[in-house]
Amino acid sequence: MSPRPVIIDCDPGQDDAVALFLAMASPEDVDIVGITAVAGNVPLALTQRNARIMCDLAGRADVPVFAGCDRPMRRDSVTAEHVHGSTGIDGMDLFDPATPLSDRHAVDFLVEAIKAAPDEGITLVATGPLTNVATAFGREPGIAANVREIVLMGGASREGGNITPSAEFNIFVDPDAADAVFRCGRPLVVMGLDVTHQVISTPARVAAIAALDNPVARATASMLGFFHRHDSAKYGTEGGPLHDPCTVAWLLSPGLFEGKPCNVSVETASSLTAGHTAVDFWHVTDRPRNALWVHSVDADGFYDLLTRRLARFGGRAP
């Protein structure tokens, strides 16, 4: 079977970086048509640079990188340096990337690439605010028909929010964009906090990655060492959750996860609950089931997959 064509829309962020590594280690499964950066965890100038650094480390300068929207569709910007550090990828040694930045805007690329998708369609993997994707759909509504599915990290239900009491960061930053994407009519696979909080990067799991002793593994372990200081203190866990790689792991090994078709609607009007994802888990309304809400994961299987794929970049076998 040919690898699935994907576009990864992201705001690196340490966990976005690991998601990129996992995808770039898996060419037999995913063909990365392009990486589109959006403002989110840190401003756009840093997210696009960070994406190119990951391409350098993974030896994938062949993957084009595009800078997209530098602010939400209709709201003020919100960033998360308190979690990710001033660079977005604090913890690793930074350098100026050799992988070039395309001179095309990410939204232009999304429109063109989705229009040109093969018959089976193209998969969008979104691990940041959904501004780029929603803007592309708004510009050319017909392209949504060429999207096979959208696998995204965002939202929360039973876990509550991580940026407000009821909202997860990616959805909160641009709830208008999220609302548009959740209403787009294409299949959605949603990795919210309900599932990502189950994949805790314990010291043993991070040590197993570090022991691979290749540049990607070393960068991953170093970034996680910084990234998890915030969530470990916040949640009282031995390590923090590794959110964004769940999207790519689902593409590589969906059997690791369990989900339920639900209606997921995004709150855009309330000042109190903006960005809240209302997950109709028990189908108590007649709203159409527009998303697979993923709620469970085999965490050991997830980290085994991640570690084995990162070993492909060289060093010691796991």
Image (cartoon, helix red, strand yellow):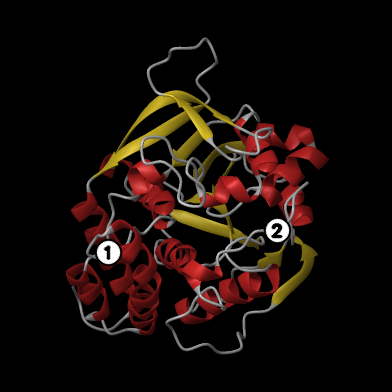
The crowd level at tag 1 (other Cα within 10 Å; few <14, some 14-19, many 20+) is many
Report the mark closest to the observer, 2 or 1: 2
Label at residue 244 = none
Residue under circle 1? 201
Q: Position of residue 154 (x, y in %)?
A: 50, 45
Image quarter of the C terminus: bottom left
The crowd level at tag 2 (other Cα within 10 Å; few <14, some 14-19, many 20+) is some
Q: Residue at 21%, 71% (x, y): give it.
A: 203
Residue type indicated by callout 2? Ser
Residue under circle 2? 77
Q: Is residue 120 visible?
A: no
Task: Tell me which label, 2 or 1, sits earlier in the chain.
Answer: 2
Q: Is residue 72 left or right of residue 21?
A: right
Q: Position of residue 120 (x, y in %)?
A: 56, 37
Q: Residue furthest top?
A: 286
Residue type indicated by callout 1? Ser
Up-down relation of residue 281 to residue 46 (above or below):
above
Q: Residue at 57%, 45% (x, y): give it.
A: 171
Q: Is residue 76 visible?
A: yes
Kind of element beneath mark 2: loop
Kind of element beneath mark 1: loop
Up-down relation of residue 169 to residue 115 (above or below):
below
